[in-house]
């Protein structure tokens, strides 16, 4: 305990959005200081870390046989305990300028549907990586705080956070989540849908990074005023040779239809379960969307059409969860109230 307090003097408390696609770190007093892909490159057959973050992501699909680039998070939760721990340690030390004697308090945002086993994995990984104390906060609550919703008021606030591995939908009032749904559909599943479409339609094999680039540049959920196209490079399955072709935004919209409809359906279900008084609040306040998926062209128009409610895209949707996790570091009483607690014996 004494050593922890001493190490704490050298540490700044941090909030972490430990995402499937990207990890963002908020340092108390400094704001968001790190945003890097949740990717680790290791030597095959070992836990020897060769690269983390942006450098490791560039290796995805391009590594020689003795190097493996992996994403230790899957569907918003820890998929590989040891690699996640190494990744967290790297990020914690990086934001503290690689000082060894750092033991910060950490707030980590987790999916609202997280299991007890998954909670334990996040806490233990963080503690092993150097955390002095770990608080877990549900992602939709963190996102709502991050975008500035008045979550402590006795009124309905609705947030839709479309991340890499999960989509979180929540109705919040009086600093509590009245109703929430967490589905393991997000940016990753959209990337997979594009990979399958290119394979099925053109016999073209493309990697995850290429699929993500297509999604960002021409992906859409609603008919565009002016349709666009992009050149795509991959490997022809039949000839086995590199190939370049042009893909239109209408095609990618068709490819993304299933994951997008899954997200729309969970929003509709959440509204159906909303208490009448809070539903009345939402008629005026509408829904706020955050996360990387909020940047998809036309997602706000489609949601508005399907729900009949005003839709607001967060000013900085990618940073919303990390900002919320960081903001509660200044309000420890509020943090104690909203933190996700582990069940005894779990």
Image: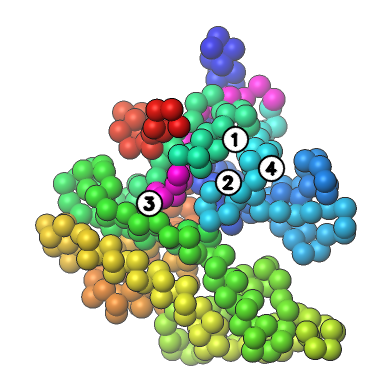
SS for dot 2: strand
Colouring used for the render: rainbow
Q: Which residue is mark 2?
A: 78
Which badge, 3 or 4, is on the more N-terminal residue? 4
Magenta region, residue range: 100-115
Farthest residue toward the front?
A: 345
Mark 4 — residue?
Answer: 83
**Mark nearer the viewer, 3 or 2:** 2
Rendered image: mark on residue 146: none
Residue bearing the label numbered 1: 125
Q: Is residue 117 left or right of residue 244?
A: left
Q: Is the residue 161 above or below the residue 101 in the image?
A: below
* Residue 109, percent from left and from top: 46, 44
Say which element carries label 4: helix
Earlier sequence position, callout 4 versus callout 1: 4
Which residue shows up at 81% across the image and 42% down it?
46
Report x, y in % for residue 223.
Answer: 43, 87
Q: CA distance from mark 3 to mark 4?
A: 26 Å
Question: As rendered, which of 60 and 16 lies closer to the eye?
Answer: 60
Q: Visible in this render: residue 65?
A: yes
Q: Are marks 4 and 1 in contact (CB under 8 Å)?
A: no
Mark yes or no: residue 14 visible.
no
Give the Cα separation between the discs numbered 2 and 4: 9 Å
> Is the Cβ of the residue at disc 1 closer than 8 Å to that at disc 2?
yes
Upstream in sequence: badge 3 or badge 2: 2
Compute the Cα span from label 1 to label 3: 22 Å
Q: Which residue is mark 3?
A: 140
Which sits in the foreground, 46 or 151?
46
65 up-or-down from 48: above or below: below
Residue in view at x 28 percent, y 62 percent? 270
Give the quadrant of residue 339.
Answer: top left
| Location of the N terminus (image quadrant) | top right
């Amino acid at each position: 305990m004494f050593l922890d307090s001493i190490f704490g003097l050298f540490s700044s408390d941090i909030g972490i959005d430990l995402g499937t696609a990207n990890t963002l770190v908020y340092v108390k007093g400094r704001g968001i200081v790190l945003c890097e892909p949740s990717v680790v490159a290791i030597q095959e057959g070992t836990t020897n870390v060769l690269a983390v973050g942006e450098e490791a992501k560039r290796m995805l699909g391009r590594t020689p046989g003795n190097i493996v680039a992996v994403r230790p998070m899957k569907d918003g939760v820890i998929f590989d305990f040891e690699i996640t721990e190494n990744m967290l340690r790297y990020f914690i030390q990086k934001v503290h300028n690689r000082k060894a004697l750092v033991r910060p308090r950490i707030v980590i945002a987790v999916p609202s549907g997280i299991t007890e086993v998954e909670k334990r994995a996040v806490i233990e990984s963080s503690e092993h990586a150097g955390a002095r104390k770990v608080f877990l906060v549900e992602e939709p609550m963190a996102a709502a705080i991050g975008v500035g919703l008045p979550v402590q008021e006795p009124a309905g606030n609705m947030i839709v956070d479309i991340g890499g591995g999960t989509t979180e939908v929540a109705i919040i009032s009086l600093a509590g989540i009245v109703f929430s749904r967490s589905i393991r559909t997000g940016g990753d599943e959209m990337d997979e849908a594009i990979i399958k479409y290119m394979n099925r339609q053109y016999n073209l094999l493309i990697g995850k990074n290429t699929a993500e680039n297509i999604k960002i540049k021409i992906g859409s959920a609603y008919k565009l005023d002016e349709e666009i196209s992009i050149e795509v490079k991959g490997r022809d399955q039949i000839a086995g040779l590199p190939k370049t072709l042009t893909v239109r935004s209408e095609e990618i919209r068709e490819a993304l239809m299933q994951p997008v409809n899954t997200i729309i359906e969970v929003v509709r279900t959440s509204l159906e379960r909303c208490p009448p008084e809070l539903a009345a609040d939402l008629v005026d306040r509408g829904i706020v969307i955050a996360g990387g998926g909020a940047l998809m062209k036309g997602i706000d128009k489609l949601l508005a059409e399907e729900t009949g409610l005003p839709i607001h895209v967060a000013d900085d949707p990618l940073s919303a969860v990390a900002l919320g996790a960081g903001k509660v570091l200044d309000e420890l009483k509020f943090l104690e109230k909203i933190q996700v607690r582990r069940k005894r014996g779990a």
